[in-house]
Image (cartoon, grey):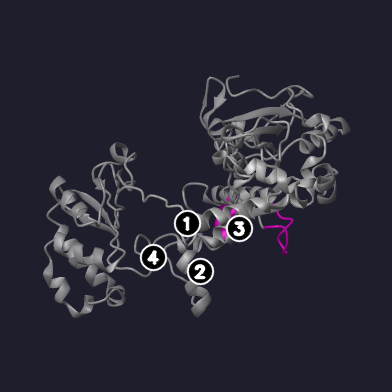
Amino acid sequence: MPLSGLRVVDLTRILAGPFCSMILGDMGAEVIKIETPGEGDPVRRQGVIRDGLSWYFAGFNRNKRSLTLNLRHEEGREVLAKLIAGSDVLVENFRPGVLVNMGFDEARLRALNPDLVYCNITGFGGSGPYRDRPSFDFIAQAMSGFMAVTGAAGGPPLRAGPPIADLVAGLYGVIGVCAGLVKRGRTGAGERVGSSLNNGLISLLAFLGANYLATGEVPARTGNDHAIVAPYGMFRTSDGEVALAPSQEQSYQRLVDAIEAPELRDDPRFATNDLRVANRAAINGAVEAKLAAGVDAMTIRELCAAVVTQSDNAAANAGRAGEAIGTSEASRAARTRTAAGQAAGAGARPQRRRRQAAGGAAEARAAADRRHARSPWPDPGGGPSAARWLPRPCCPWRPPLPPRHHRQGRLALGLRHSAGDGAALAERGAQPGPRARHRQRPAAPWRQRRPLRTVEAPARTMRE
């Protein structure tokens, strides 16, 4: 897997941080979750509990190993220091300054492990007037402006049902960690990255934020209507409601054909999307009138064929490429069929082509030889079998990997092997370059792959 062989020290709790480290574990990293003795992560006691296990906790802490450490005691901090020194990534979601007060400021982290990728997830970022404030998902949704644009027109602000602020901060944390690992593979130096709940949600305001910055006009809540597209939203029918999202002009034209309403195309009020937005009530009423007879299976198929809807059963179609819309209940008496515009085609994936230097194979070979000459790593030599495997420059004590799975070796430097390169490099006396020298130091004893020693009483495992 992409992150196999990497170790992550996870000092996070609740949701944003555990979601970040969960994804890193899903991609193959070894994640060691540090918890408070006797208590553990508070989420262990939240949500539905079955057989003593919180399914909420299990869902966001899978693929992790648990270790309890009392970080208020010197012995616990010493063990943490050794773990950090032998790991590749550190993720924490303390408020700014908490880790520093424990004795792990950025200077000490660099002294313990110059290669460390350190990720900090906070409520409001590492700078600014609110940097020291704690935050939770609901607070971030309110302060970011996300709730201000969510809800019905004229109604109160509403929060999104899922904890989207926590989740997007965790996703940005994963992106930062992966970018830091790429940089480390190129330069050998560690990196500090971070994300925050508030800033993450602000980045998701998309066209709403762009329009505000361009015009200074505060965006209004529009409910299920789209602020800049019409028709769009939920439409009543005789047997429920249907969701339509023809977000492009060609999709709208196909919708007009599917509902057999050519008069909409001839109406000057609906000639362009901007005109339809200005006459939103009229265009929505016209579409709804055509759907008033009811939406049956035939209508759904026709809308799908027009590429303005998808399926009316998400459970049956969740595995299909490009289909992620299904049924929901608007009330106990009415069945709501949902459909989405812009159905993605499930065509074949385009084949990736290797770029070849101009002039054919001879020039491509010459370019490859020039790259070999700049290689910071000695060629394994000895024929095709020896050239097939590469050491891990970041982890010399771990077994080698095939080049196509090796993201921090020759391929990351744009280098290739062939059967005769070993002798050529030997004649030139190629030696590791400056980017490789930092990796030649001997591994510290605690970097060896040994079973972890538990300090204090271990936290309960998921099965316990």
**Residue 287: x %, y % from top left:** 19, 64
Q: Marks 1 and 3, Cα distance to the nearest angstrom? A: 45 Å
**Image check: 378 left or right of 50?**
right
Which percent across, then down, holds residue 44? 61, 30
- Is 283 above or below relative to 242? below
Going from N to C along the chain, the mark reached first, 4 or 1, is: 4
> Which disc number belongs to residue 222?
4
Q: Which mark is residue 209?
A: 2
Q: Residues within 10 Å of mark 3 (few under 14, many from 20)?
A: many
Name the residue beneath numbered marker 3: 198
Q: What residue is shown with label 1? A: 356
Which of the two discs, 1 and 3, labels the residue nearer the N terminus? 3
In the image, residue 133 lies in the stretch drawn in magenta: yes
Earlier along the polypeptide chain: callout 2 or callout 3?
3
Q: Residues within 10 Å of mark 2 (few under 14, many from 20)?
A: some
Magenta residue span: 125-142
Q: Is residue 38 visible?
A: yes
Is 456 drawn above or below residue 332 in the view shown? above
What whole-number distance in Å separates the C-alpha atoms at marks 2 and 1? 42 Å
> At label 4, which amino acid type do we have?
Thr
Pointer 1: residues within 10 angstroms few (<14), some, or many (20+)? Answer: few
Label 1 amino acid? Gln
Check disc 3 and give the amino acid type. Asn
CB within 8 Å, label 2 to label 1? no
Asked whether 356 falls inside the magenta stretch, the response is: no
Q: Residue 222 placed where, x, y %?
A: 38, 65
- Tag 2: residue type? Gly
Label 1 residue SS: loop
Label 3 – label 4 distance at C-alpha? 22 Å
Residue 250 picture quarter: bottom left
